[in-house]
């Protein structure tokens, strides 16, 4: 009797049957209310893995106060959104997910997020944060951080802040992340200085996808400017994020247009960093995009009441916002917390620049813009005719949106 | 039942049972116990899964789990030495990881699954209704206590201006009541149970339905308490009519009906999103080949995909073969050292290598232009033709060690006496290689070349990490470029931007599968001709 292979065989069977059973039981772990009336249930929160620790304290004290257990699940930012969109309709997703406001169009179109009522506390947030949290007139996100780019200046090389773009270029080398496909996010402040936002806004302040401003006169003026900068070598599509960083850290470049996420690397390298607003090429304000981070409630959550309470009345407090600020060093979205955090001159610098920032459009139409935008800009920087290239960009985007 | 037992005197029932036990016990007892233990674990997990699935009412999966468990138990407890004992695990894995995936991809290809069509119709309706709630402008915040009476939930509201207590339910508009106050907020009322907050937190489903009309006039809106503590006045802009299965926009009067396309659609074609998943027949396949924006680049991308896959296989194979021939020569010293160096590219993760190469090929800062070509501006990745060459070069660098290993093994498998016989007959080395070694080698290697073709046909990693498909075509309106192969084009069409189109991507995947499968089948047939050489 040959029994010796059966161990392996049976192990295989276990694997299969357990796979099948996992498919069943994973549904049961979230959102059931079998945990009894006394405990108040469990809130599952998907958090960007780096911020689990920052939230742990808040989660524990929330449980102590209300009896609702907050289970923090650290996830990679890269697949959080897609996993969320796919899992919510099956009932398996979390109750709350941490994310960025520009996910909103996609989340809302897929019907996976529930509206969130900030109530009177909405006035306590930075206007740009509140505007970003609102989609189509409804608030869906509890904001906790506002991120925007600014110019990092090597204060040892250039002690005075430049007054305009030309002034900056004359004072020292300026680098900005581009890459073969361009980088419209980093060029956007210059574009707005020419009076050409991507979309116009409607009465409620939401972006209007039918009002494409990219093709305005300002857009073409910006294209001409891009061509001139490309020819002069101020903008170079060979410079990607890593190269730009290296040049600034080496002291080759005196100005670096980037976000708060790179400040740590610069200060660690011993550079005396000062934060300046983006110098305008035209004299008009150069408004960068603001990216707002926050928390969304799943539309299929069985614990919406607790989720609302946890977000609005707990994450929305100065204490927790400052806790999250310490973990990420990004300006808090709550005004009171932001003012406290701004005692750090770097944060204060970003806050000042952020006052001019506009929320990145979250409407799904924006996806169609990104696809063509950077490539067109890169082509212009590399010598394509600005008029025809920009016109093609406008045509492509118009065709893709309709 | 052993065959030896049969021809002798027929055994009675007890004897047969005894024989069975003896037979079963004849194997090592340890294995026997392990088998029973493992099967017990499997059954325990299956039983647990069955209960869970029963609770979730997943009848199909439940049926499958039960059937598979019964079958597995039957197979391994059976006395017969059935081949199924060896085949079962493999077949189950095959079904789960291959057949199921293929069928599921096929199924998705016939649906509209993607952004905006993500869940079920019920979810779409509730999501639409939830997001259509708009807070009445300048309305106050009402402190709220959730109360319950005989299973009916109500909101005990304190009017922030007058300080009066109001009570209402989903059916009953708010009306003034006498209540007990605590810190200016009404907290209890006679005849109703005040629910503690912890209890309220578990009543999400009930509270969501609890929309208390502010007055008899629906235009005044209704009061909801999203967090169970504070109430706000809302008016809804959408209404669902379950009988007619339509959604009406109360502000514009537009009626949206289910037209079978997976979303509520108005007469003028305007859709309310989110919609829901539904089968759309061959729509995705039709779109994959006829959509104007896709059709344009599809031809050039398809041609490049074939060129890329064929050239990748050819170049890597011949370089690998050449090196294998060289290093197979016993007169060469330090052969093992060289071999290890040659295999290094293979030991690196391919996507990482591709990224590194992308950096080295940077036009103004890359190592190749800066150091090797002394600061030349060679547009390795930004010129359409040079980018294609670069892709092939990098793939050659990545792929030749594999071919080298394969050829090395195959060459060593060719008996030396064949070689000697040929030399005795007066063949020169080229003739020996061309007429003897290569045909013999191809018998072994041909199937690997075919699978290598199939691999490169879908070599998404390399393209995406090295060029992202760029430089872009400048005359088309989708973000597809000169070095895009079919699979990366599918990725871009279906997944770039903020919209995902799983249905279209699946349809494409199936089409690509058919192409690769056809080529493979034909090639495998052809290779049979090679085997006849032996």
Image: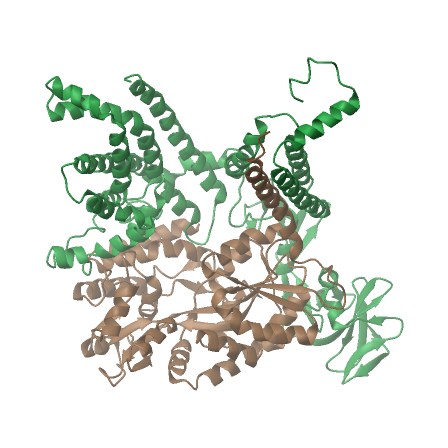
| Residue placed furthest toward the right | B191
Location of residue B422 in the rendering, given as x and y in whole percent from the top left corner: 16, 20
Nearer to the camera, B159 or A176: A176
Is any atom of residue A332 visible in this view?
no
Q: Quadrant of residue A139?
A: bottom right
Q: Is residue A301 above or below residue B315?
A: below
At x 64%, y 54%, the residue is B253
Chain for colour green:
B
At x 30%, y 64%, the residue is A241
Chain for colour brown:
A
At x 20%, y 63%, the residue is A230
Location of residue B22 in the rendering, given as x and y in whole percent from the top left corner: 69, 29
Q: Is residue B473 left or right of residue A294?
A: left
At x 45%, y 63%, the residue is A361
Q: Quadrant of residue A382?
A: bottom left
Location of residue B139 in the rendering, given as x and y in whole percent from the top left corner: 66, 74
Location of residue B336 in the rendering, given as x and y in whole percent from the top left corner: 22, 44
């Amino acid at each position: 009797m040959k029994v010796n292979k059966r161990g392996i065989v049976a192990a295989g069977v276990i694997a299969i049957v357990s796979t099948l059973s996992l498919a069943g039981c994973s549904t049961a772990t979230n959102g059931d209310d079998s945990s009894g009336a006394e405990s108040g249930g469990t809130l599952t929160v998907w958090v960007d893995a780096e911020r689990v620790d920052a939230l742990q304290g808040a989660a524990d004290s929330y449980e102590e106060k209300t009896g609702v257990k907050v289970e923090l699940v650290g996830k990679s930012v890269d697949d959080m959104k897609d996993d969320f969109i796919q899992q919510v309709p099956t009932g398996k997703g979390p109750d709350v997910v941490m994310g960025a406001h520009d996910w909103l169009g996609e989340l809302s179109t897929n019907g996976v997020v529930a509206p969130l009522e900030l109530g009177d506390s909405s006035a306590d947030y930075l206007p740009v944060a509140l505007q970003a949290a609102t989609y189509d007139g409804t608030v869906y996100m509890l904001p906790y951080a506002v991120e925007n780019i600014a110019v990092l200046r090597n204060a040892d090389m250039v002690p005075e802040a430049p007054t305009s773009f030309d002034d900056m270029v004359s004072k020292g080398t300026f680098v900005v992340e581009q890459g073969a496909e361009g980088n419209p996010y980093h060029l956007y402040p210059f574009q707005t200085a020419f009076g050409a936002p991507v979309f116009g806004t409607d009465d409620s302040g939401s972006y209007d996808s039918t009002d494409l401003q990219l093709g305005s006169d300002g857009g073409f003026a910006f294209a001409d400017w891009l061509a001139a900068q490309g020819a002069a070598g101020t903008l170079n599509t060979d410079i990607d994020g890593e190269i730009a960083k290296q040049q600034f850290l080496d002291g080759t470049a005196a100005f670096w247009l980037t976000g708060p996420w790179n400040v740590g690397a610069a200060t660690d390298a011993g550079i005396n960093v000062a934060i300046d607003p983006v110098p305008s090429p035209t004299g008009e304000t150069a408004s960068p995009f603001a990216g707002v981070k926050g928390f969304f409630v799943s539309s299929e959550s069985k614990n919406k009441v607790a989720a609302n309470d946890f977000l609005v009345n707990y994450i929305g407090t100065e204490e927790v916002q400052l806790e999250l600020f310490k973990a990420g060093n990004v300006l808090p979205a709550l005004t009171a917390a932001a003012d406290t955090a701004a005692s750090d001159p770097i944060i204060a610098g970003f806050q000042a620049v952020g006052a001019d920032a506009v929320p990145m459009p979250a409407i799904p139409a924006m996806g169609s813009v990104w696809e063509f935008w950077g490539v067109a800009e890169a082509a212009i920087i590399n010598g394509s005719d600005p008029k025809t290239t920009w016109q093609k960009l406008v045509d492509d985007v118009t065709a893709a949106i309709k | 039942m052993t065959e030896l037992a049969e021809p002798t005197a027929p055994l009675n029932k007890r004897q047969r049972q005894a024989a069975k036990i003896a037979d079963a016990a004849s194997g090592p007892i340890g294995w026997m116990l392990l088998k029973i233990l493992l099967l017990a674990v499997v059954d325990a997990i299956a039983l647990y899964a069955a209960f869970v699935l029963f609770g979730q009412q997943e009848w199909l999966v439940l049926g499958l789990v039960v059937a598979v468990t019964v079958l597995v138990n039957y197979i391994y407890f059976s006395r017969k030495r059935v081949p199924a004992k060896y085949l079962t695990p493999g077949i189950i894995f095959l079904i789960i990881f291959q057949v199921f995936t293929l069928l599921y991809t096929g199924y998705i290809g016939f649906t509209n699954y993607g952004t905006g069509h993500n869940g079920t119709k019920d979810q779409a309706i509730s999501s639409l209704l939830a997001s259509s709630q708009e807070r009445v402008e300048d309305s106050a915040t009402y402190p709220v206590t959730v109360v319950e009476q005989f299973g009916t939930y109500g909101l005990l509201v304190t009017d922030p201006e007058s300080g009066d207590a109001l009570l209402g339910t989903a059916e009953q508009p708010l009306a003034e009541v006498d209540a007990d106050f605590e810190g200016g907020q009404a907290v209890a009322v006679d005849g109703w149970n005040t629910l503690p907050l912890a209890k309220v937190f578990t009543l999400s489903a009930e509270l969501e339905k609890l929309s208390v009309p502010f007055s008899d006039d629906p235009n005044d809106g209704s009061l909801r308490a999203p967090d169970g503590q504070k109430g706000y006045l809302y008016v809804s802009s959408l209404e669902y009519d379950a009988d007619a299965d339509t959604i009406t926009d109360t502000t514009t009067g537009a009626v949206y009906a289910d037209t079978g396309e997976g979303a509520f659609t108005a007469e003028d074609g305007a859709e309310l999103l989110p919609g829901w998943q539904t089968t759309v027949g061959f729509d995705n396949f039709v779109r994959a080949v006829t959509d104007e924006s896709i059709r344009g680049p599809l031809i050039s991308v398809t041609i490049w995909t074939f060129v890329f896959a064929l050239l990748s296989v050819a170049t890597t194979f011949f370089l690998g073969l050449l090196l294998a021939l060289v290093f197979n020569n016993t007169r060469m010293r330090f052969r093992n050292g060289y071999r290890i160096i040659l295999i290094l590219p293979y030991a690196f993760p391919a996507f990482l290598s591709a990224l590194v190469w992308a950096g080295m090929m940077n036009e103004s800062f890359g190592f190749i232009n800066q150091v090797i070509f002394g600061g030349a501006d060679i547009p390795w990745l930004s010129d359409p033709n040079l980018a294609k060459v670069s892709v092939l070069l990098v793939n050659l660098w990545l792929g030749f060690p594999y071919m080298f290993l394969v050829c090395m093994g195959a060459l060593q498998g060719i008996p030396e006496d064949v070689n000697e016989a040929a030399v005795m007959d007066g063949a020169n080395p080229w003739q020996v290689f061309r007429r003897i070694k290569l045909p013999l080698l191809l018998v072994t290697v041909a199937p690997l070349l075919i699978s290598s073709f199939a691999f490169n046909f879908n070599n998404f990693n390399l393209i995406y990490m090295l060029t992202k498909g760029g430089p872009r075509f400048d005359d088309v309106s989708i973000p597809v470029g000169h070095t895009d192969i079919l699979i990366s084009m599918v990725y871009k069409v279906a997944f770039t931007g903020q919209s995902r189109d799983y249905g279209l991507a699946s349809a494409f995947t199936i089409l690509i599968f058919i192409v690769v499968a056809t080529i493979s089948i034909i090639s495998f047939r052809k290779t049979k001709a090679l085997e006849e050489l032996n």
